[in-house]
């Protein structure tokens, strides 16, 4: 094959490859939607092109880069195979030190053994996965650092929680998912536009409860999560009304009424997954209404 042909050209001198593809999630809810709503709530979106570039970078950070970090950690096969490979590798590469050798010789032998252990027992399992994970994490931190220290700290928290997410039980995993996929992206977007208020914290915590309830319905299918979802929506509507936003409160109440009608159908059929798919637009509408209400508040 000619060296100048297309299949040969990308290989020459290239060190890393990036593969982006649509994930086709269960719902439209998630880090991208939360980041968009956080940007709207900040009131920083205006006619200037810099604000829209910031929005694109925030969505790239929260959805693509942090998502790639989580996927590389949670879906890696090497996390299961690595302990077995280490046990086998220690038999061959971690031989006992000779007592008659000098301290320097024993130190050099131990170092050589550990290098061989990493090279032949660990690296063949994790090379591509760990490189992809580290690159995604490095890009995420560099991009967050371009915004401000608060965005960097929140990004660090998201990366750390993703590592914890893979080590805890499913019951606690869903709560961490709600924090990583909704709470932190919302606040990262707000911090990128240099905005924060305790009222926004209050509303985001309520929306996190809504998102956690939807995750609970999908995975556990416990009816108590219907109640949590309804209570959180009701509190949001009342808080908007108390904040002198009666129109926004009425819209959230209508979204709650629509969800309640769907609950009457899907609860009888026991189809929580289908329920979540059908009511995602109402939850997303509630998020947008809340973000618009926060964005209209005087700064």
Image: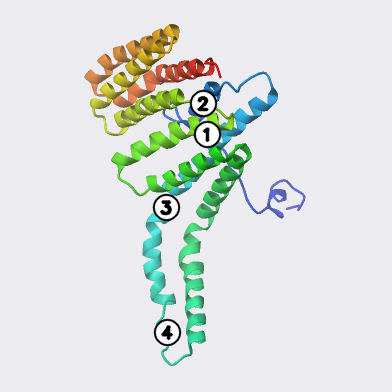
Quadrant of the drawing holding the C terminus: top right
Distance (Cα) linking label 1 and label 3: 30 Å
Q: Which of label 2 and label 3 is nearer to you?
A: 2
Q: Mark 4 touching mark 2, by CB under 8 A? A: no
Q: Which of 278 and 9 is in front in this view?
A: 278
Q: Which residue is drawn at 44% across and 76% down?
A: 93
Label 1: which residue?
188
Query: Mark 1 or 3 closer to N-term?
Result: 3
Label 2: which residue?
38
Please tell me the numbered disc located at residue 97: 4
Label 3: which residue?
77
Answer whether residue 28 is visible to the viewer in this image: no
Q: Which of label 4 and label 2 is nearer to you?
A: 2
**Left or right, residue 178 beside residue 65:** left
Q: In which quarter of the image is residue 209?
A: top left
Distance (Cα) linking label 4 and label 2: 59 Å
Disc 4 secondary structure class: loop
Q: In which quarter of the image is residue 279?
A: top left
Q: Residue at x 34, y 37 (%)?
A: 174
Query: Mark 2 or 3 closer to N-term?
Result: 2
Distance (Cα) linking label 4 and label 3: 33 Å
């Amino acid at each position: 094959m000619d060296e100048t042909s297309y299949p040969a050209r990308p290989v020459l001198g290239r060190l890393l490859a990036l593969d982006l593809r649509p994930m086709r999630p269960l719902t439209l809810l998630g880090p991208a939607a939360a980041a968009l709503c956080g940007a709207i709530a900040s009131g920083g979106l205006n006619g200037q092109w810099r604000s829209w570039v910031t929005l694109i970078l925030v969505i790239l950070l929260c959805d693509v880069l942090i998502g790639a970090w989580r996927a590389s950690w949670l879906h890696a096969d090497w996390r299961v195979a690595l302990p077995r490979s280490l046990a086998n590798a220690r038999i061959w590469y971690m031989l006992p030190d000779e007592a008659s050798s000098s301290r320097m010789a024993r130190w050099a032998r131990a170092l050589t053994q550990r290098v061989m252990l990493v090279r032949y027992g660990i690296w063949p399992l994790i090379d591509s996965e760990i490189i992809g994970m580290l690159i995604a994490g490095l890009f995420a931190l560099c991009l967050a650092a371009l915004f401000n220290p608060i965005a960097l700290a929140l990004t660090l928290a998201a990366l750390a929680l993703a590592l914890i997410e893979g080590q805890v039980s499913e019951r606690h995993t869903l709560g961490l998912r709600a924090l990583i996929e909704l709470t932190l992206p919302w606040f990262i977007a707000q911090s990128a536009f240099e905005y924060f208020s305790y009222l926004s914290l209050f509303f985001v915590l309520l929306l996190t409860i809504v998102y956690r309830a939807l995750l609970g319905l999908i995975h556990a299918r416990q009816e108590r999560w219907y109640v949590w979802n309804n209570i959180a929506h009701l509190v949001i509507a009342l808080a908007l009304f108390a904040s002198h936003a009666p129109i926004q409160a009425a819209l959230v109440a209508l979204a709650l009424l629509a969800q309640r009608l769907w609950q009457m159908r899907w609860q009888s059929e026991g189809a929580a997954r289908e329920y979540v798919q059908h009511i995602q637009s109402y939850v997303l509408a509630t998020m947008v209404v809340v973000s618009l209400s926060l964005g209209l508040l005087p700064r």
